[in-house]
Image (spheres, rainbow, N blue to C red):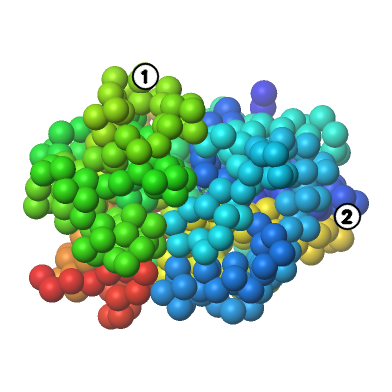
Amino acid sequence: MTIEQAETDVLVVGAGIAGLSAALSADRAGADVTLVTKAERPEDASTWWAQGGIAVARDDPATFREDIVAASDDTAEATAVEVLVEDANDAVQDVLVDTLDVAFDTNGAGYDYGQEAAHDEARILHVNAETGKHVHVPFLNHIADETDVRLVEDTAALELLGHEGRVYGAVLERDGEWAPTFAGATVLATGGIGALYPRSTNPESATGDGVAMAALAGADTADMEYVQFHPTAYDPAPPERSAGDTGDEGTFLVSEAVRGEGALLRNADGERFMPDYHEDAELAPRDVVARAVREERETTGVVTLDVSSLAFAEAFPDLAAKCDSHGVDWTEGIPIAPAQHFLCGGVAVDDHGRASLDRLYAVGECSRTGVHGANRLASTSLLEGLVWGRRAGRDAAGRSPERVEAPELLDRDPDLPPAFAGEKFHRLRRVMDEQVGIERTPQGLARAQSVLRRLKGEVDAYIRTRTSRSLYELRAASVVALLVARAAAENDQSAGCHHLVEA
Ligand SMILES: Cc1cc2nc3c(=O)[nH]c(=O)nc-3n(C[C@H](O)[C@H](O)[C@H](O)COP(=O)(O)OP(=O)(O)OC[C@H]3O[C@@H](n4cnc5c(N)ncnc54)[C@H](O)[C@@H]3O)c2cc1C
């Protein structure tokens, strides 16, 4: 299918929960909406992979608020938290229950609310431990079949059309061809940055495109140093594997809900260690558990999640099946290690997802709303995407597209060495893992910036003469990696996911 120059009132880039929510609400507000995603299948969005579920306020918003702020190391922004908590019940009821008919698990007394680390009460709606796909697939189907939104798959936004502080749409690429789409408002919903790290729970396509496009167009970013690592991702590799190796196809997340049900972390000597690190032991905030797991792995060799005290196969049938398919005998404990999981920062936005450039919005994981501060509370990310998507979509509607001069992109170059992106990504991931990971030192961050600056320079030199999606993804990754390393170097206070240690 060829790509042509087009116009739309609202251009949404990315079809995870945040982009879908923005598209739905702009459509409801009467806008002509185009939703593009570079994904070819639902699994190419983190939303599909979400396990634990989506938190709601139930009838105790005050405690929900307190839990979010406590998990963030007291750095979450009060006004943003208020928005999330105030909108939570209504957004979930309106979109997920009334519109999409998501059948959240119930028990005899109503919804079977789950409880996860750092939540003071059971407030998480879920479908088994694979909530994401039960939300994402019906949402995609609803947008495609029940709304006027134009959903265009396998189509990547490469660059924003920016002029004098305003955004007019984006250059889109499909099948190696590209053309501008002019929009009255542009909503970025491109998800996370897992591709910047050798071990991540995110899909491979999480290259940080939206953050990079916004930053290159001149929009503000914030809190980029706060990269969250999930403490319990299945570790398919021997622990002695060198940092910087890529290719973690075998890894998968073992949800916090498993620890919520009583699973325990043990080191290579079989000792339970979390009570030595935090009074909440296995249910301590993610950053605390991730650092403890890392330390125990380093000192004793292996860390396993002991699920022997729970009816694992009955409570988490999909996880048990995943273990089986990876040849893991979970009755002996599941070998785990931390993996990059979530970016708390991103494109700086207000309570309606408005970025610092006119007519540009960002929602979901690529945005920085202030809700997470330095560390995200489990199961609040789907909610943030849903809530901010709804608000941004409504706000973005009502403007007509205008045309501006589109940048000249250069011809596709068939001579791009196939290994070019692979080699650069390898270097980038290695330095992010070694210097900009769970623990950081000022010296390491300085070194990382100099490596990343050089790498970005090499990629920029290629971009000046060639156009291809993989090259733009690599550029996005190099821009975002530098933003993360720079933000980390500029912040001399350890908080949440940003943890400084002595060299
Ligand atoms: C394994 C796992 C488990 C999780 N469990 C939970 C949980 O239980 N509860 C919870 O709240 N959160 C959970 N999270 C986090 C949560 O899933 C994500 O933060 C959230 O889904 C992000 O939604 P999003 O819409 O912002 O991005 P995504 O769902 O990642 O969607 C991004 C979309 O943007 C598209 N895209 C990217 N770049 C471009 C481009 N240049 N052009 C066009 N399209 C582009 C992608 O193809 C994709 O469609 C989990 C995450 C993972 C990975």
Q: Position of residue 111 (x, y in %)?
A: 69, 45
Which residue is tagged 1? 325
Task: Say if residue 444 shows up in the picture.
Answer: yes
Q: Identify which residue, 7 or 462, lies in the foreground.
A: 7
* Sequence-first tag of 2 and 1: 2
Give the residue type at disc 2.
Answer: Ala
Q: Is residue 195 left or right of residue 377?
A: left
Q: Position of residue 137 (x, y in %)?
A: 66, 32
Q: Which mark is residue 29?
A: 2
Query: Element under label 2?
Result: loop
Q: Position of residue 308 (x, y in %)?
A: 32, 35
Ligand 1 quadrant in view = top right
Displayed quadrant of residue 374:
bottom left
Q: Quadrant of residue 394?
A: bottom right
- Residue at left 10%, top 70%? 503
Separation of disc 2 and disc 1 at Cα? 45 Å
- Residue at horizontal 44 percent and vertical 27 percent from the top: 313
Q: Is mark 2 within 8 Å of ligand 1?
A: no
Which residue shows up at 44% across the image and 57% down it? 117
Element type where label 1 sits in the image: helix
**Residue at image x 29%, y 56%?**
290
Quadrant containing the N terminus in the rendered view: top right
Residue 445 to residue 342: above or below: below
Q: How many other residues sit within 10 Å of disc 2, few (<14), some (14-19) or many (≥20)? A: some
